[in-house]
């Protein structure tokens, strides 16, 4: 009896697909609605937390970075990064995971995501400057705001050191 119930349950989807044309339409509609809602939620979160908040912040920091008083500076000269780098940075972060989501096979998607995280981890640990993939591409780094003098450009730096406070 249990074999009969198990086989019936196992073949239920096949039977429904065969005899109920509406079943396919409902499954596809449900899948599309879930995909759209997830895409909208992901897009909205992405725009708010990785574009709007860093662009409003003087140092280009997300909420976490703002809480821990971190700023993004150019790795070459130490000045604050331009707004274009703040805009490009999250796209680099999410490019590989987004490509992984487009892959049909779940196993391959997991391999891509874990490989990306593992490579990023190795880059941070074993590189001389401790830069991850996005920081290497944009040639920027993160520093502590309270421990650093941060300037937008060389002109601001010279103006600061010409003041009384800067000469101390």
Image (cartoon, grey):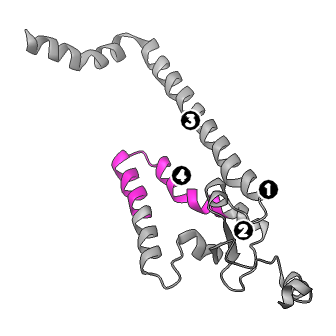
Q: Which residue does the image show at 75% across and 74% down from the upper left?
A: 80
- Location of residue 6 in the rendering, given as x and y in whole percent from the top left corner: 15, 16
Disc 4 crowd rating (10 Å Cα; few below 14, some 14-19, many 20+) is few
Q: Is residue 79 left or right of residue 89?
A: right
Callout count: 4
The quarter in which the C terminus is drawn is: bottom right
Q: Nearer the viewer, mark 3 or mark 1?
A: 1
Q: Nearer the viewer, mark 2 or mark 4?
A: 2
- Which residue has dot 3 on it? 38
Nearest to N terminus: mark 1 or mark 4: 1
Badge 1 element: helix
Image quarter for residue 41? top right
Q: Is residue 153 left or right of residue 130?
A: right
Q: How far apart, in angstroms, are the residues tagged by discs 2 and 4?
A: 20 Å
Badge 4 element: helix
- Which residue has dot 4 on it? 98
Q: Nearer the viewer, mark 2 or mark 1?
A: 1
Q: Nearer the viewer, mark 1 or mark 4?
A: 1
Q: Is residue 28 above or below residue 106?
A: above
- Location of residue 147 in the rendering, given as x and y in whole percent from the top left corner: 67, 77
**Extent of the magenta region:** 89-116
Query: Which mark identifies residue 56?
Result: 1
Nearest to N terminus: mark 2 or mark 3: 3
Nearest to N terminus: mark 2 or mark 4: 2
Q: Is residue 50 magenta?
A: no
Q: How far apart, in angstroms, are the residues tagged by discs 3 and 4?
A: 13 Å
Nearest to N terminus: mark 3 or mark 4: 3
Badge 1 vs badge 4, beta-carbon distance below 8 Å: no
């Amino acid at each position: 009896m249990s074999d009969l119930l198990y086989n019936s349950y196992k073949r239920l989807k096949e039977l429904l697909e065969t005899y109920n044309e509406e079943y396919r339409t409902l499954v596809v509609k449900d899948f599309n609605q879930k995909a759209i809602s997830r895409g909208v939620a992901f897009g909205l979160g992405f725009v708010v937390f990785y574009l709007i908040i860093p662009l409003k912040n003087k140092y280009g920091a997300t909420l976490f970075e703002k809480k821990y008083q971190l700023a993004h500076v150019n790795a070459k000269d130490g000045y604050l990064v331009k707004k274009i780098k703040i805009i490009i940075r999250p796209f680099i972060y999410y490019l590989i995971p987004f490509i992984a989501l487009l892959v049909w096979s779940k196993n391959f998607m997991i391999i891509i995501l874990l490989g990306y995280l593992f490579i990023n981890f190795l880059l941070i640990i074993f590189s001389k400057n401790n830069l991850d993939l996005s920081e290497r591409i944009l040639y920027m780094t993160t520093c502590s705001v309270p421990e650093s003098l941060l300037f937008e450009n060389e002109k601001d730096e010279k103006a600061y050191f010409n003041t009384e406070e800067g000469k101390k």
